[in-house]
Amino acid sequence: MTANGRSRRAWWRDAVFYQIYPLSFADSNGDGFGDLEGIISKLDYLADTLGVDALWISPFYRSPMSDWGYDVSDHTDVDPLFGELATAERLIEEAHARGLRVIFDYLMNHTSIEHPWFVESRSSRDDPKRDWYVWRDPKEDGSPPTNWVSVFSGPAWTLDERTGQYYRHTFLPNQPDLNWRNPDLVEAMLDVARFWLDRGVDGFRVDAAHQMMKDPHERDNPPVPLDYERPWKDMGEYDNFVHLYDFGHPDVHEMHRQFRKTVDSYPQEPVTVGEIHIFDLPEWASYYGENFDQLHMPFNFHLMAADWDAGSLRVAIETILWNVPVGGWTNWLLGNHDERRLATRLGPEHARLAAMLLLSLRGTPFLYYGDELGMTDATIPPGEGMDPWGKKVDYLSRDGARTPMQWSSSANAGFTTGTPWLPVAPNSESTNVASELEDPRSMLNLYRRLLAARRDSKALRIGSFLTHPASNDQVLVYRRESNEEIATVALNLSDEETQVKIRSGTVAVSTVDPDRTETVSKKLLLEPFEGVLVSHQ
Ligand code: NOJ
């Protein structure tokens, strides 16, 4: 609180986040897997060279790695692959020493099958922890209790012969669902959050945040109607059903309120960002809570789902901003460890426009490691895939976007002295930190310029967003405006040179020409695929 009793603007609204997939970021001990010591060794790059403000670090907890850490067997310890608990504590300290905030993953929906809670729970029907997971009798014919399918395909129930009951799993059979309707489990999970908050973590990215509360009557999902339009990517078998009953039961909101209360009791003003894959915008927005008492931000995947053309992007951005409750704040991302990389999806020219878009919208940007270099997906040779989803459904493999960070043009892109757990992408010779730092035209230097521009501009960080009338089918133009400053962003998504009318100002960043700094008087010329940030002061 400030002296006049008004809350300060929360830190995370002004921050740019950077997601680290720890297995692939930097390997300090040559075993081929990235680790926490590796991350510590790159904090100067993140804080100073690149210039981000906060890190989201994907799971490094103890895990049998069936889903590469998203299957936790001990929430309060570090897997030996990544280091020790003390390394995680030092990572928080070292990040803070450089002014970086750090958030970790919080896995609400499920644990690993090897978690001691599940081992106990499955041991007998009478075990005190039986109800910490979801166990149900088979139907009379022996089949699973509902027709629900797991996100990774196949039934969402597995029969445990020992006790003759099915357990539920939204993802792999190795990832049994926790039962958030059991108060002891809720308390145990809140203790997990407290454990990391006590160690100074600045918040959580909440995994599968809408999944854990399902229909208490356990009704079957209806099959999709014939004219059904998929809101998101092709999810295979999962898309055969309308998911009415297997996620997002209204009880989920009470769980988020409890979680939020726990988090809010800490002085570091922790942030909670929830993975909410819901494309009905009012429903998505309900995860802020009526009194802003649930998630600080549901993750905003809508830009990733939008078609990449000026008109569709404009509609997507405006619609999202209209649906964020007044006083709320959104975030933007164009990549993460579950999706194909943005440079693969969009190609090199559009990837540069995407960088400008992401870093100039109203809302907190989330960058995915390596996108600042223009890393693209690797093709993994058949039979060498690591992703359990890809092993079930080939085209849904996420390995391609999880390849080692490209630090230099030396062996294994400078990621490891050993054999990397996933192959290094083929463009690492030219697309890497060391080479790109030398080249003013590189993607990395574009990101650095954009990050610096955002840091220095109140209009970009907190200003209002208004689509500019010069927008058309080829060009997206918008204005960001704070009390003191106005900025205009013009993105030419076409392969033709074009001109837009804007008010006078100075070019601050161009996506194609690092030396472009002219004063613009009413007309702004845009090269093919050029994005320009103009500041009016
Ligand atoms: C969402 C995570 O982003 C994904 O990587 C993981 O496989 C599932 N949740 C299951 O935890």
Image: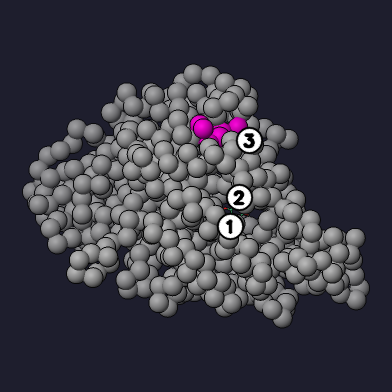
Q: Residue furthest top?
A: 410
Q: Quadrant of the N terminus?
A: bottom left
Residue 163 visible (yes or no): yes
Residue drawn at 14 percent across, 56 percent down: 485
Which mark, by number, is residue 81?
A: 3
Q: Amino acid at mark 2?
A: Thr
Q: Quadrant of residue 240?
A: bottom right
Q: Counting other residues with Cα less than 10 Å from the Cα at mark 3, is it few (<14), some (14-19), or many (20 or more)?
A: some
Task: Name the one closer to the observer, 463 or 532.
Answer: 463
Residue drawn at 45 percent across, 37 percent down: 370
Q: Secondary structure at mark 1?
A: helix
Image spot of residue 9 (x, y percent):
28, 61
Q: CA distance from mark 1 to mark 3?
A: 21 Å
Question: Which is closer to the viewer, label 2 or label 3?
Answer: 2
Which mark, by number, is residue 192?
A: 1
Image spot of residue 263 (x, y percent):
47, 63
Which mark, by number, is residue 76?
A: 2
Q: Amino acid at mark 3?
A: Leu
Q: Earlier in the sequence, mark 2 or mark 3?
A: 2
Task: Name the one closer to the observer, 68 or 79.
Answer: 79
Q: CA distance from mark 2 to mark 3?
A: 15 Å
Q: Are marks 1 and 2 in contact (CB under 8 Å)?
A: yes
Q: CA distance from mark 1 to mark 2?
A: 7 Å
